[in-house]
Amino acid sequence: MTRGAVLVLGAAVLLCVSPAAAAQTDPDLATQRAESLRLSGRPWHAAETLLAAAAREPRLNATFIVEGAKAELHARRYDRARSLLMGQPWLEDYADGEALAVLAEAEARLGLPTAAAHYAAARARTGGVRAALLAVREGLAWEAAGERDSAAAAYAAARAAGLSAIDPWLRVRQARVTRDTATAFRLLADLPAPVAREAGAARAQALLAAGDSAAALEALAQAGRSLDVARLARALGDSTRARDALYALMARAPESDDAAAAVGVALAGLAPRTPPEYVAVARAMKSHGGAADARLEVERALRQGDSSAATLVLAGELLAGAGRYRDAERAYRAAARDSALGALAIYRRARILARIGDAGAPQALSGFAQSFPADTAAPTALYVLGDMFADRGDWAGAARWFDELIARYPADLRASLARYRLAAQALRDSLRDSASALFRAEVAAGAPQRMSARFWLGKLALLSGDTAGARTAWLTLAREDSIGYYGLRARREVDLPPLRFAPAPAPAPAPSAAIAAALGRVDTLLLAGLDTAAQAEVRTILGRAPQQELDALLAWSDGLARRGFGPAAVRLGWQAALKAPNDPRVLRAIFPWPNRRAVEAEAAEFRVDPLLLVAIVRQESVFDAEALSPAGARGLAQLLPGTAALTARGLDVTFYPEWITVPDLNLHLGAAHLQELLERFAGRVDAAVAAYNAGTTPVMRWLARPGAEDPDQFIESIPYQETRGYVRSVLRNRELYRALYVVPTN
């Protein structure tokens, strides 16, 4: 048995293999199957297939081992890819450097300094465009290892090999590491957009490479690179300038990625010393998930005498988030007299009192609404008042405040919610006329939920025996809200045939030469490992969208969707909708299905509707495999790490948190989780979708309410506004995917 076979077998022992993968035994067939899986967007399944075959085969050839390493690389299991190839006697002679290139990529992903030399060795064994792309990756690896001269030589080699499509980006990379500033500045001359935005920072890097740290520092400052200024100033011993740059950055843009990095730099040697510095670092911490640490920094600022309203309001927010409601209430009360932030402090204090059930909450909320009627929070204050009384079962008290809200702010979303609360209670009390009047008022006000009100007016007409009136209302709604949730629901009520659109042309029209060239540039950047540059090119495409014609927008959208830029593709689809809102091509741009084969395969494995699964993915991540929610959910199916780990254990699948964004593994776990929810709620799609968003515990509580057996009433009575909208959106998405794409019966 070869060393490679031992390594593969070791990996197979460490990784639990899915039953589907275990069925594959012949190495050659397994290799073919794995490649097919990878090309269909299922790299994790490809790796599983090869591992299963390896566990059953005593002798493995070089081809199988390399394909296994490639599969592990695509599945983002970089350490395993490296272990398969290290020390193989045929490594340097295999297929024009292919094995060396795979090893180098795995090492680069792991941050190992040996990556650059392996890229160089791979490049020496091949030619043409492949050699040029390897030269770029070699340059990146030399840069990461701090070897600037070698990096500059690699970038020069890439440019000489003819990567003209991305030459401006390569000029920037080469200039960054070139010690001869005259040469560097020539490379940076006359750069096109969006590359030109990188020139300032590249000029500074060139000065630094030449040893002119002082000039580099000024160039970084002129380029607006505050974080780099701080790092370089600190390295040069200028802690004052470093401190000023760091804390100014955190105060100015606490939500930015640079601010998150600035926190680490500050705490590593430039810790805050003054109240403004404590507050700046706290805001940056809070913006990046560090609320507990942020609270400690704010408390230090308060202890040093900072009594500004801004700091007190921030303290109140952080204390409330930690469940210290009384302390939060005191902080807001102390800020209430401030001319700029007083209204906000008064409102938040009132909400805290309501949260803890304080007897003073009604007076605080009503006082705020009376004192600040033009404040955007005034409608919410009145709604919370009504909600407090409704929760006690005092609907007369609730109606008083809901009625005031509706009278003062008839078109506000909170007034919409109030009408619905009152209408739902009227229906429970069999007061159909009152409910009907509330729904008609919603329509007359042009309020946010007017389509819902029109749907319910049809239901009330039907309950009253007015079949013709109900049908007329629903037919009109189906026509006027043809692709909205309520229009689609109305369509079902009157037994109209399912919505269908003309199929997409096959093959799709070829894009123009200019669009093809720009998309080719994005492809080349991605193949070269210049992902940030590719994203900059996509942002440029989005910036030019308003000036584009319909066909161009659709071509851009389709091209970006196929390349994994789902959110950008959908944005272009919405831009196209301004020109042709009912064009099926536009709807396919807004509701694309770029990873269809992977979604359908996972849906089939777990016996769930592929249309429901893609509807959830569209709503959760807009097909962004790296999507990260504020709550920490990740990937295409937006799974929390805990949910993903629990689901993986149930499937007997080995799982590590860093694997959560592998596209098909994320879909695999998401489909399994959806199946669990459907089984838990006896196949009720509405409840399962609600639980996917809000969790099972609240959904169980909502299902116990009177009338919850009616899906329409259940959805409308979901108290979480986000979840209510989420359920409607997912169900709408499912119907639109059904109308836009031909899907075999599952």
Image (cartoon, rainbow, N blue to C red):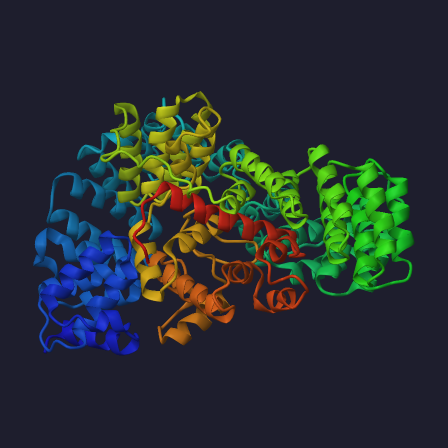
Rendered residue at 58%/36% (across/down) = 472
The quarter of the image holding the C terminus is bottom left
Of the 4 image quadrants, the one containing the N terminus is bottom left
368 left or right of 4 in image: right
Count of marks overlaid on the render: 0
Q: Position of residue 718 (x, y in %)?
A: 64, 57
Quarter of the view holding residue 208: top left
Q: Nearer the viewer, residue 522 or 687?
A: 687
Q: Nearer the viewer, residue 695 or 15?
A: 695
265 sits left or right of 323 in the view:
left
Residue 111 drawn at (x, y percent)? 34, 58
Residue pictured at 42% horizontal, 62% vertical: 670
Q: Position of residue 216 (x, y in %)?
A: 47, 36
Q: Residue at the location (85% across, 48% down)?
A: 401
Q: Which residue corresponds to the image point at 33% horizontal and 25% vertical from the top-left?
A: 186
Decide if residue 604 is on the left or right side of residue 696: left
Residue 208 in sight here: yes
Residue closer to the observer: 257 or 615: 615
Measured from the top left, where is residue 422 in percent x and y? 77, 50
* 669 lies left or right of 272: left
Q: Is residue 178 visible?
A: no
136 vs 312: above or below: above
> Against 22, is 483 above or below?
above
